[in-house]
Amino acid sequence: MKRAPRLPFLSPCPRRLALALALGAGVLLSACQSASPKVDSGAFPLPGAYRHAPPAGETSASRNSPPAQWWTQYGSQELNRLVDQALAHNADLRIATLQVAQAKIRADQARAGTLPNVNAPIKAVGQAQGSTTDAQQYSQAGITSVFRLDVWGEQRALVDSADMQLARAVHERENVQRNVIGNLVTTYIACLSISDSILLAKENETLATGVLRAVENRLALGDATLDDLEQQRAVVFSQQVQIPGLENQQEDLRHALSRLVGALPGQLVLSEAGLDALQLPTVQVGLPSALLLGRPDIRMMEARMRAANANIDVARARMLPPIDLSAQVGYSGAALASLVQPQNLLVNAAASLALSIFDGGQRKAEKAFAQSYYEEMVEVYGKTVLQAVRDVESALSNLRTASRKLEAQKGITRAALKLFSQGSEAFAVGALDQATLLEHRKNYQRSSDETQRMKAELLRSYATLAYALGLGAVLADGPTPPARSEAAQAALQRDVRVGMVNGAVALLDDATAPPESAGTWGVELPGVFHRSSLLPLWRDLQSRGLRGATRPGSTPPISATSIPLAKPPRPGTA
């Protein structure tokens, strides 16, 4: 029996060399590794309370906590439906959701860089030299593995940086959602305000027409002149001119709403309701420190700052020599037919350390740039925190001022209406001249327009305050703290995996469908959806008439405004 050849990698020399390299790496690591700058996100000074916050007990707002779905406090089912449609179909939100998926892929890619790289190369080489006809053949097949020891922490820093970029993408999507909801609510309020303005313009036209009839009657009695008649006709025409301009503004606002909800302008159907259809919400501002957890732009900047901090570790680790380990197991021989033979077995292992002697200062400059960029992110983070406090203070001040102005303006409008009504009666019997009546009418019209404008401003002030507080970024009561520990980062990874649904989505699944939908049909939609948009998407489909039939074999009704489906609906599981 032939004895198997001794494997060269079992000799003590390579093992001692690898051990020496590892020990040298540990010594260099302890000697060269320096601490990265760490900045506490709460190091920036914040006030203990907002200066313009209402005192406790002054309003009912002090007894209510701000809900995440703050727009529901307006009490408008139409507004709730529009927000659901925007959360389900807004293009900016879909783009931001796809960016989260891309950041998740990059984070997985960075984590895969910490694992060995295994390949299976197969070679068959034929070689001839000079004018000889004899050709040499060489064949090789096996498995090779290359692994870089992360003694300097480069791979760990790359993973941390990718995780923070993932957190930044998540918070950026939350910020996009906050912007979409805020813009939608303010645009909807402006649309209702324009509806009130159109109604007021038509009422003023009716009043002016009534005065015109009174002037005609007085002219018939000889108590008015033709100049009075033409002057009043000009007033009627001026009121009629205002209505088309207001209707054009209303159409522009409806187009803006259709863009926000992801629909065509002709598909958006709105009621003719005015501002009276909305209730005045109650909002509790909480403490300024809550902004660090509630505002997605702050959390996004914190993630960028922490990613920049991790990039310093990456740049510093790349200044040190990398240590690579490689191993190969396979067969190597001259003939392919007899390649897999015991004597052709090839096993080797190697360890390498590459020292950089001269690079023109590139690595040092890269570390200096990473340090400078981190310091920039620290300043931007502090600027964002302070700007958030200013936004809330400004919103609180505007809210209080708008409320006081509206109450005073209502008194002015009541007085102007009473004066105009009395003047109209006096003018009808000839006890008041036309110029005075026109002045009373102008005062009432200005007061009515100003009252309507101030009411819209008050409603927008609540929306501005909710936006400044960061409400609507996460559709759950109470903000979620940013990921700072390994456990929190693992939770973030888990939430992203659960929240991002690739491919078709069964909307009537137990996890997303209301309890009463058991046994109904499901709808599959192509694309990537965020977990928080599934219930709004379901409610939007219900509002469009896409309710499932309880009878197998029937097809759910699809309205003309339904979004296109990638495939016909199929029965869903209860």
Image: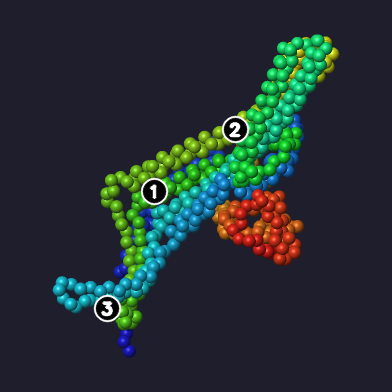
In primary-sequence order, the first of circles 2 and 1 is: 1
Residue 146's spot in the image, x, y percent? Answer: 37, 64
Label 3 element class: loop
Q: How far apart are the two marked residues, 3 and 1, measured between alpha carbons?
A: 46 Å
Secondary structure beneath disc 2? Answer: helix
Kind of residue sitting beneath label 3 = Ala
Q: Which residue is mark 1?
A: 315
Amino acid type, mark 1: Ala
- Residue 221 % position (x, y): 83, 12
Q: Would residue 508 be visible to someone looking at this image?
A: yes
* Label 2 – label 1 distance at C-alpha: 37 Å
Point out the image quarter for the N terminus.
bottom left
Task: Say which of marks 3 and 1 sits in front.
Answer: 3
Q: Count residues near mark 1 (Cα–Cα under 10 Å), then give few for <14, some for 14-19, many for 20+.
A: many
Observer-nearest of 165 and 241: 241
Disc 3 marks which residue? 334
Quick one: label 2, few (<14), some, or many (20+) residues within 10 Å?
some
Give the mark nearer the N terminus: 3 vs 2.
3
Identity of the residue drawn at 44% across and 62% down: 115
Q: Where is mark 2, residue-wise?
A: 391
Q: Residue at x 72, y 66 (%)?
A: 552
In three-dimensional space, the C-alpha distance between marks 3 and 2, rounded to whole angstroms, equals 77 Å
Foreground mark, 2 or 1, reads 2
